[in-house]
Structures are given as C-alpha cells and as structure tokens.
Image (tube, rainbow, N blue to C red):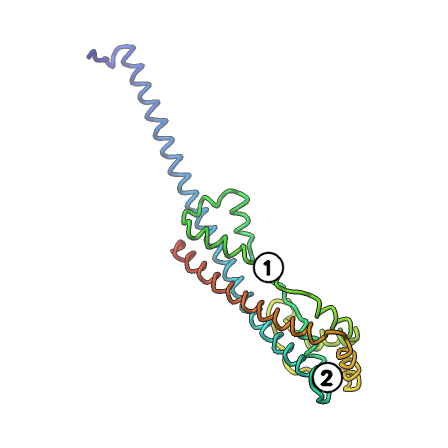
Amino acid sequence: MASIRLNTPAGRLAAEFLLIVAGVLVALMVDAWLEGRRDAEQRRQYLVRLSIDLQADLENIEHRLVFFTGVRAEALQTLRALQSDAEVTTDDVLAAFYAAENFDFSAADGTWQDLLSTGNIRLLDDIELRLSLNAYYGQNSIIMGAQDSTYRARVRGIIPASIQSDIREHCPTTDGEDRVPSGFPPCEVPGFTVEQANVTYDRLRQYPQIDELLTYRLSELDVLVYLLDVYKRRLLATQQRLQGNVA
C-alpha cells in the first residue's frame, strides 16, 4: 500500500484533516462531558426540590389527620346529642358547627409539574422513582374529592350567622395562617346563651334527615382519614426512594 509523506501536499492535507477530525471529536467529548455535568447538577437540584416539597406535604398531611380526627369526634358527639333527650348546651352547637369544618389540602407539586412540562423528567433515570412520584401526585384529587358539602350547607344554614362569626373569632380550629390545626378545645362564645343553643338545636332536630346527613358525614370522615393515611404511607415510601437517589 502506498504511503503518504507528510512533507507532500497530500500528506499535509491528510494531516490537517486528521487534526480537524480529532479537534471535532475532542470538542464533542468536552460538550458531552459538560452537558453531563449540567444534567447531573440539574438532576440534583430537582431531587432537592422534590425532597422539600414532599416534606412540606408530610407536615400538611399530618396536620389534616389530626384535624379530621377531631372533626369526626365532634360529629359523633353531635349525632349522640341529636338522638338524646339530655339538656342542650352551647358546646353541643359548637360541636355541630365543628362537625362541618373542612381543611383543604393540595400537594406541593410545582417541581413535579416543572419536570413534566419541560421534559426534564428524563433526568430522573430511576424508573421506580418516577412511578412512585406519579402515583403519589396522582392521588391528591382522589383524596379531596371524597368530601361532600351537604351537611355543612344544612348546619351553616341553621346556626345564626352572628353566632358562626363569633365561633370563628373566639374558637378558631386552625392558626392565623390556616396551616396548623389548633384542635377543638372547650370554648366559650361571648353572648351565646343556653336559650339560643336550645332554639338552634330545635331547628336542627326538626330538619328532615339530619341524622342521615350526619351519619353520612361520619362515614365520609372515616374514608377521608383512611385516604390521608394511605397517602401518607405512599409519601413516606416515595421519600425513602428519593433519599436513595440523593445519597
């Protein structure tokens, strides 16, 4: 086979061609390395953001488990009072009011939505993590969709508006930022008398199917607490999978 001398025009041309090819290959390798570095850093940032979102969700879910467990106790107390001949107290009206309380929940899914909308979901190369995140965030609408407002509308339509305003002012069930439940401790509403409580309870008892509505509310709360607990366990499993990727 004929050889090409470097000191000939053909040899110099071949050498220049090889240098260009080598330069292009090196540039491509450097670009790929830099892109890999950028992807790794972006992936790390996404994982950190997801971890923060999930931790915030965990705290919010735990708050709502406490809250709705308390609401259920108030609903059960109200059902017993409605079916009893015992003397009505202002606490009975408070319990009926509390039994209709709600505490919305929305998952902190900004990072997850960002991953989906930008196509950066590709950066999460752990398929099991992707599936776990998708299952977790997909359950949110199911949980909040478990609630019905019928009992709430009936009770809030019977308890005088002025008393409801006083209850909200003097006996709040969450803190000022509406984030942390403060529970349902015994509370006195200024100016709310036993006579007013009896009138209000008489109207409640006279409402058609109030027992059925409250029984349904109790069942609804049972389902809601159950779903929140399932959601929490799914979140914890997702957190564990995520930590394995961050480490």
Residue 77 position (above or below residue 126): below
Q: Tell me which corner region of the image, top left, top right, bottom left or bottom right, holds residue 193.
A: bottom right
Give the percent coordinates (x, y) of residue 78.
Answer: 67, 80
Q: Amino acid at mark 1?
A: Ser
User: Which of 135 and 235 lies nearest the eye of the viewer?
Assistant: 135
Q: Residue at x 44, y 45 (%)?
A: 123
Q: Who's the residue at 42% across and 49% down the image?
A: 127
Which residue corresponds to mark 2?
A: 90
In the displayed structure, does residue 66 sit left or right of residue 44? right
Q: CA distance from mark 1 to mark 2?
A: 34 Å
Q: Nearer the viewer, residue 69 or 203?
A: 203
Assess whether mark 2 and mark 1 are in contact (beta carbons under 8 angstroms). no
Q: In the picture, residue 23 is in which quadrant?
A: top left
User: How many numbered marks are there?
Assistant: 2
Which residue is found at the position 73% from the left and 86% from the top? 88
Q: Is residue 45 above or below residue 186?
A: above
Q: Is residue 174 above or below residue 23?
A: below
On the image, the x and y values in percent for residue 11 come to 27, 13
Residue 164 disc label: none
Q: Is residue 46 above or below residue 82?
A: above
Q: Quick one: SS at disc 1?
A: loop
Q: Which residue is mark 1?
A: 106
Which residue is rendered at x = 48% and y = 61% of the image?
234
Question: How dense is the environment of label 2, judged by Cα within 10 Å: few (below 14), some, or many (20 and up)?
Answer: some
